[in-house]
Amino acid sequence: LRLLEKITNGSTIEINDTGTKLRYRPGMIVGASGIEHDCGKSRGIGWYLEALLCLAPFAKHPLTITLKGITNDETGLCVDTLRTVTLPTLRHFGIEQGLELRIIKRGARPEGGGEVFFQCPTVKSLKPINLTNEGKVRRVRGVAYAAKVSPQIPNRLVDAA
């Protein structure tokens, strides 16, 4: 909710004293430039990016945000999946110029410490697409990373694949 509050104008969040009731009134999605948001250690950055990918194209101004936290999480989408699958799909809808998702630093549980830069332009409307032809598999790619272990381990994974 704090992230939505940063990219909207006029939204209100009311939480009662016991923390059992929440009232959220959305405002106008304005977007902004240079926003930073700490995603904490309970959810991965991908969880926050999913909401931003749906809302950011329809903001008044382009959105530029840096998210900090866990980049690869076993409970949600990792940022690599969003970068390699979701962004190319958005490009089919006509959101191309200025769409970027860059992983600056990786962060894993429990420390976090990852950093992701996301930039999204605004669009008036989405272009319709037809995804009935599945096409052929041309190549299979992957990402290998490791934290607090020898760099030989991900290198061996790549060689074995």
Image (cartoon, rainbow, N blue to C red):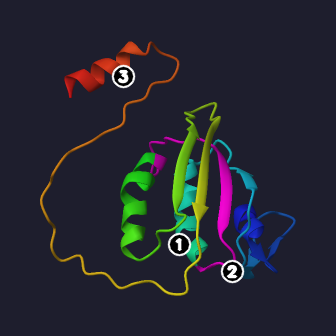
**Sequence-first tag of 3 and 1:** 1
Q: Position of residue 7 (x, y in %)?
A: 72, 69
**Residue toward you, 135 or 51:** 135
Give the foreground label among 2 and 3: 2
Is residue 26 something that shows in the picture?
no
Query: What residue lies at 55% left-to-right and 35% top-to-bottom?
Result: 106
Q: Which residue is mark 3?
A: 154
Q: Position of residue 76 (x, y in %)?
A: 46, 51
**Cβ–Cβ under 8 Å for marks 2 and 1:** no
Query: What residue lies at 56% left-to-right and 66% top-to-bottom?
Result: 51
Query: What residue lies at 67% left-to-right and 51% top-to-bottom?
Result: 66
Q: Which residue is mark 1?
A: 54
Q: Is residue 76 left or right of residue 98?
A: left
Query: Rounded to the nearest whole Å, what is the CA distance between mark 2 and mark 1?
Result: 14 Å
Query: What residue lies at 59% left-to-right and 56% top-to-bottom?
Result: 118
Secondary element at image label 2: loop
**Cβ–Cβ under 8 Å for marks 3 and 1:** no
Secondary element at image label 3: helix
Magenta-highlighted residues: 58-79
Q: Is residue 54 left or right of residue 38?
A: left
Residue 138 is tagged as none
Query: Rounded to the nearest whole Å, what is the CA distance between mark 2 and mark 3?
Result: 42 Å
Q: Is residue 94 left or right of residue 130?
A: right
Q: Is residue 62 magenta?
A: yes
Q: Is residue 86 left or right of residue 129?
A: right
Amino acid residing under circle 3: Pro
**Cβ–Cβ under 8 Å for marks 2 and 3:** no
Packing grade of label 1 (10 A; few <14, some 14-19, many >=20) is: few
Q: Is residue 77 magenta?
A: yes
Q: Which residue is mark 2?
A: 60
Amino acid residing under circle 1: Cys
